[in-house]
Amino acid sequence: MLENARGWSVTPAVQANRQQDLVHRAIGRPGIVLIGEGDAQRVRGLLTQEAKKMARVAQDAPVTTVVVGDGADDTVALRKLQGKLQRLPRTLKPAEVTALRQRMNAIGGLMDQLPVPRGPLPKGARIARPKRR
């Protein structure tokens, strides 16, 4: 989770698919903002899955979805994303945001769940061993 000085905390890549469409989660005073990047049609399914998951975990927090794209068909251009997020209405109090962040930290993201690759180790790789005392 990345903390920002402006009160936002961002968890990159909380959902993904094989075509590398991603959903990122940002938490701030407006609530939970799910930001999807990739093909707009494919990413909407990921956004709805993640929005349902967030609604189960944080019932009292509003969930907003944003699709980043070239600016057509209900998408937001990347250069206009910051302005879009700043214009969202602030519905949560700072104490509620802190509690929400702690709850989302417990859930984690996709990066926490990535499997370790299988197969033989490369020839030049060294395995780090703990030091003896």
Image (cartoon, rainbow, N blue to C red):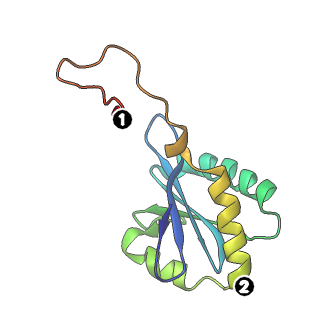
Q: Is residue 83 left or right of residue 125?
A: right
Give 58 or 119, whichever is nearer the viewer.
Answer: 119
Q: Secondary structure at mark 1?
A: loop
Q: Is residue 91 left or right of residue 24?
A: right
Give 28 or 131, whichever is nearer the viewer.
Answer: 131
C-alpha span from label 1 to label 2? 50 Å
Q: Secondary structure at mark 2?
A: loop
Residue 48, image x, y percentages: 68, 52
In which quadrant of the rendered image does the C terminus lie? top left
- Judge whether 81 appears above or below 12 on screen: below
Mark 2 belongs to which amino acid? Lys
Q: Residue at x 71, y 60 (%)?
A: 103
Residue 102 is at least partly visible in this image: yes
Viewer-nearest of discs 1 and 2: 1
Mark 1 belongs to which amino acid? Arg
Spot the residue most to the top. Answer: 120
Residue topped by disc 1: 133
- Judge whether 10 appears above or below 126 on screen: below
- The numbered dot on residue 67 is none
Residue 97, image x, y percentages: 68, 76
Q: Earlier in the sequence, mark 1 or mark 2?
A: 2
Residue topped by disc 2: 93
Q: Residue at x 64, y 81 (%)?
A: 29
